[in-house]
Amino acid sequence: MYSVNYHRASSVADAAKLLKNGDAKLLSGGMTLIPAMKTRLAAPSDLVDVSRLKDLQGVKVSGKTVTIGAATTHYDVSTDEKLKKVCPALAHMASLIGDPAVRHKGTIGGSIANNDPAADYPAALLALGATIITNKREIAADKFFKGLFETALKEGEIVTAVSFTAPAKAAYQKFRNPASRYAIVGVFVSKGKDGVRAAVTGAGEDGVFRSNEVEAALAKSFDAAALDGLKVPAKGLMSDLHASAEYRANLIAVMAKRAVAAANA
Amino acid sequence: MGIEGVGARVARKEDKRFITGGGRYVDDMVVPGMKHAVFVRSPHAHAQIKKIDVKKAQAMPGVVGVLTGKELKADGIGNLICGWMIHSKDGTPMKMGAWSPLAVDKVRYVGDAVVIVVADTKGQARDAAEAVEITYKELKAVVEATKAIQPGAPQVHAEAENNLIFDWELGDGKATDAAIKSAAHVTRMKIVNNRLVPNAMEPRAALGHYDKAEDHYTCWTTSQNPHVARLVMSAFYNVAPENKLRVIAPDVGGGFGSKIYIYPEEIVCLWASKKTGVPVKWVADRTESFLADAHGRDHVSTVEMAFDKDNRITGLKVDTIANIGAYMSLFSSCVPTYLYATLLSGQYNIPAIHANVRAVYTNTAPVDAYRGAGRPEATYVLERMMETAARELGVSPAELRRRNFITSFPHQTPVIMAYDAGDYNASLDAAMKAADYAGFTRRKADAAKRGKLRGIGMSCYIEACGLAPSSAVGSLGAGVGLWESAEVRVNAVGTIEVLTGSHSHGQGHETTFAQLVTQRFGVPIDSVSIVHGDTDKVQMGMGTYGSRSGAVGMSAIVKALDKVEAKAKKIAAHLLEADEGDIVIENGEVKVAGTDKSLPWFQVALASYTAHNLPAGMEPGLKETAFYDPSNFTFPAGCYICEVEIDPETGLTEIIQFVAADDFGNIINPMIVEGQVHGGIAQGVGQALLEGAHYDASGQLLTASYMDYTMPRAGDLPSFKVSTSNTPCPGNPLGVKGCGEAGAIGSPPAVINAITDALGVVDIPMPASPATVWATIRATKH
Amino acid sequence: MSDVSLTVNGKRVSGSAEDRTLLVHFLREHLGLTGTHVGCDTSQCGACVVHVDGRAVKSCTMLAVQASGSTIVTIEGLADGAELHPVQAAFKEHHGLQCGFCTPGMIMTATDMIARHPEGLDEATVRAELEGNICRCTGYHNIVKAILAASETMAKGAKGKAKQAA
C-alpha cells in the first residue's frame, strides 16, 4: 500500500469537507478499497472514514418503505428482523455477500458507490427500483449505476442511504465464481406495484443491467415456468477465464428461473 | 499399544502452541536491526535485460540496499542446481541452462527475480522497488510444452535446442509394440494432467543474518529439509561453508513439496545481509507465491493400453511431454521420470510397458514435485485408461481391475519397482462396501428424477514411498543419498530427546515419533521431546518429502532406540547383577524377567551419567545415533471411490461421497494418518474439480491470486469415509509404508471417472469446473 | 503517522503507526502478537481473523488507525489463563489442525460462528460459514468436526450455567 492519510469524519458534512483533500476517497467497510490499496491498484492520498457515523447506520422500516443507512453492514442488513418481514429477499441477498468476516465490515453504501460489476447490491437496488440518497440529492437506481465501477455520483457526493418500497415478491439467486466467490451471475427479481423488474450482476460488460428478456417473460406471468426455454443473448456479456458469455447467458436464465421460484415459494 | 504407544490415537503434543497463537514461523522471527526485503520481479515472460538503474531507488526513504545479479555474480554466488542427472535415450546428459538467483542478462518467466531492495519497512522496500528502472527488450514467449518443442518456437535456454532438456525412456519398447500389435483390443487416450500451484498457507519466507564478528550466517527459512538447504547453499551456491552456515526451519506452515527446494530468495537474503550489514527478512505475498513457488504436474500424454481376448492387459505404451518451466528446479528432472514412469504398472500385472518422456523448457514458473510428485500423474494415466477400457470392453470397472490385479508378492514390474506386499482386492472390497456401490443404480435413478446426473468412479492407486535406497537412487542419477538420521538422547533424569533429520510441517512428528519412544521404554509421552529443523542441533539429515518420514525417518529412530535399549540393558544387568538377556523394559521400569528385581528407568539413565558403577570398559552416557538407509521403496496402495451429482443447468458438480480404503502397512497414530488422507483427498479433488494454473499465450499468469485460482473450501467438499486394511511392509522394522501423499495420488482419477460416468463422455479436462462441465454437456447435446 | 489506541485481549495498548499500517501488522509487529497470520493478499484466506468489537473481522483488510478505539481479541486472548477455550480444546481433540498456520483464524472464525448460532450448528452451516477461511492441510473434515463438537460443548456449558443461575 502507498502512503495515505487517514481521517475519521465526525459528520457527513465533515466528511464532505475532508474529501476536498488531494485525491481523497471515502472509506466505509473497506472490503474492496483496502485490498485494492494493498495491491497498489488504488492509491488515494487521503481516506475519509465514515463507517462510524451513527447517522449512516441502521435499517428503518415504515410500512412498506425501507431505508437503509449507507454505513449499515451486510451482516446488519442480513439479520434485521424488520427487513426480513417486509423484504426477506434483500436480507437473504446480504447474507450471501463474501464471507462472515466480510459481512461484518462491508457496507451497502460502499458496495453501491464502488459498483463492482460482480457485486450483489447493485442488482438488488436496480431490481427493487430503489432510490439512492446522497448528501446532495436523490438518484433513482436506474440512473445511478453507470457502468464498470462507475456511478452517477459527482465529486464530493456522499451516499447516505438507500430507500425503496418493499415489493410483493422478490428473490435473489447467484452462481458464484468458484475462486473469487463473487457472482458469475446474480439475478434479483421483484414484483411490485410498478410491475416486474429483473436485474443481473456479474455478467454484463457494462456492469449491472436489467434483463429485457427476463422481464418481458415474467410480465406475462410471474412464474418460473414462464422462463422455460428462455434464450438470453450472449452479446454484451463478459467472457473470462471462469465463464464464457454463452455460459453466463445460460446462467442468467437458470438463476432467474430459480429466483422466481424462490420468490413464489 | 498403551494409551500413548504405537497404534494409539494420541492427541498432538504440538497443538498447544498452534491453538494458542504460540507457533513460531519464519515471519514471526525478529532479529535486532532486521530490515525488510522486496524482490523486483520480471513482468515479462521472456526478455533481455538491457539496463538496470537503481539510483532513484537507492535514494528513497529507509532504503538500505538495492542489489543486482551482477553484484551477486561478482561475489561468486553460484547458479541454482538440479540435483538429479537424467540421461536421454541417446546417452547424452540432460541439457540444463543456467539459473542465476538474480537474473543478469535475461528473464525467462513472469516472476523471475531481478533485483533485491532492502529497507527499514516492507512498505518502504516496495516503494523503492517501484523506483528501480529496468529496461527490457521483450522476446516471444512459449508457455505450452507441446508448442515449445515445435521447430521455430522461442528458445528459452541456448543449451537446450528446441527447448528439449531430455528425451528419456524406460521399459521395453519392442515388446510393448508387439503387444499392441497383437492385442484383441487397444484403448487409446490423450491424457492431460493440469498444472497446479501448491499453496501452502504459509507463504515462503527467509531471514538471512550475517554475523560479522563471527563470520557466520544464520538462515531461518520455510524449508522441508534444512540440512539439504545448507549443503546446497554451501557446496554449490558458495554462500558460506557448512560450518559457517546455520539453517533453521522453525514451524513451517505446510509444504506439499514446494518447500523442498532451495530458492533464489533465501540465497539472496543471506548474501544481501552480508552486503548491507543488516539482517534481511523476506516474506512472500500470495501473488509472489503463485508466480515464483515451484508449480506441480503439467503433463500431456498419449497412451495406448493393449488387452487380450480375456481382458488381460498385455502392454502399455506412454508418451509423455512434461513442462519443466523456465528453469530446472532442484528435483524437477526425477519427477517425470523415476517418480513417474516407474509407477506405470499400477496395481496390475502388465507384461510389457514402455514410457517415453520428453522434458521441456517453457517461459513459465519452474515445475517440481508437488504432493505425490510423478505418482499422481502415473495413477491418473492408468486409472483413466482402465475406466475407459472397461467402458469400451463392456465390463464393470471393478471386474476389469480385479482381473488384472497383482496377487502374489514380491512382484517385479517391468519398470524397475519390486512390490513387496499388498492386497489390492481387500482395498477394492472395502471401498465398494463403504460406498454401497451396489446401491448406486438406484441412487442414479433417484437423482435423474430430480433432474440431476449421478456418476460413480473408482481409482486403484499404488505409490512408491519411503524414498529411498541410496545406492539405487544413486545409480539412477540422484545427487544425494536418501537415508535418514536420528539421535536419541536420554537425559540423566530419564527424560528423552529425539533429534531427527525429518522435518514436520504439519505431519505431527512431535507426537508420532514420541509414541515410538513411549512404546519402547514405557515412559510418559510428556517426557519425550522431538527436536528437528535446526542444523546446529541436529546432525545431517535429509528432510521430509515423498512420504518418507515414517518409513525412513522413524526407522532411523528405531535403530537408535535399539542401541539405547541395548546399552540400558547392559547397565541394568550390571546394577541388578543379572544376565543381560533377562532384562526387560516396560512401563518405565527396567526389570529382571521372572523376578521382582527392578530399577526405575531414570535410575538407569542416572547411572549412565554418574558413571560410578558401569560395566568394565563402558563409556558413560546414554545417547545413541543411527543412520537408516532403506533396502527398498515402500508401496502404499488403495482404492478410492467418488460419487458425484451434477446439476446440468449450471454444470456444478457436488461430491456426494468420497470413500478411501488404503493400505499403509502398520500405523503409529490412526488419527494423524486419517488427517493426512483427508488433506490429500482435498488436494486431489481440488486438482480434479477446482484448481488449475493458467498462463495466457504471452506468459502472464492469469491465476495469480485466490481471486482466480480456486482453492478448495469447506463448502466444496463432503466429509470423507476413510478406512485402512493393512498389510505390513516387510522392508522396515516398523512395517510402515507412508500415508502423506496417497490422497492426492488416488483421488483425481476417481473424481474424473465419476464425472465422465455421469455425463456419458470419454473425457473432460481438469479442473472440471462448472463452466467446463456445462460446455461439455452442451457439446454432447449438439 | 497516527496514534493508535486499542484494547487488545483486555489490555489497553497504544502506539504510533503509519496510516497505511494494517491492523494485522500492528498486532504482529508493534504488539508482538504473532499468532495472527497473513496468508493472502486478497482478504480470502482468513488466517488473519480477529474479533473487533465482538465481531470476526479480517485484520488484513482494516487499517490499524481505523480500528483505533476498538476492543480486539486475538488468538492469544482466547484461552482463560491456562484453560483452553472450548473451541481450542476441540481443535486439539479432533485433530482440526496440521501445520497450524490457518488455525488461529479458523478458531477465531469458529468462536464467532458459534456465538452467532445459539440454536446450534449443523455440518452444512459450518461448511458454508467457513467460506472465508482456507486450509490446505486438513481437507476441512476434522475442522468441521471440531467446530460441531465445540458448539455442542458450549451449548451444554451455557445450559449448565443457566441452571446454576436459576
Image (cartoon, coloured by chain):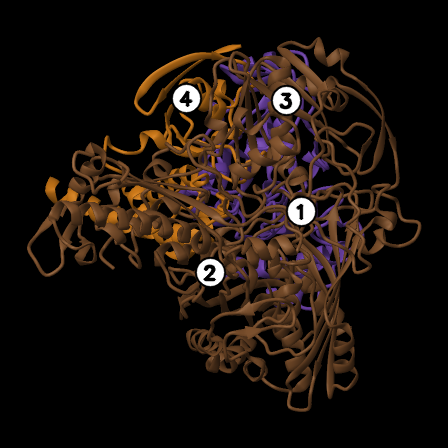
Give the number of the disc on residue C32. Answer: 4
Question: Which of the chains is brown?
Answer: B
Residue C112 visible here:
yes
The quadrant of the rendering that contains the N terminus of chain B is bottom left
Going by the numbered disc 2, the residue's amino acid type is Pro
The quadrant of the rendering that contains the C terminus of chain B is bottom right
Horizontal placement of A4 versus B25: left or right?
Answer: right
Q: Residue at x 70, y 16 (%)?
A: B66
Question: Which of the chains is purple?
Answer: A
Q: Residues within 10 Å of mark 3 (few under 14, many from 20)?
A: many
The quarter of the displayed image where residue B374 is located: bottom right
Image position, residue B637 (x, y; %): 50, 67
Give the number of the disc on residue B718. Answer: 2
Per the image, the residue denoted by label 1 is A202
Q: Identify the chain of the residue marked 3, using the numbered disc in the image.
A: B
Image position, residue B188 (x, y; %): 75, 75
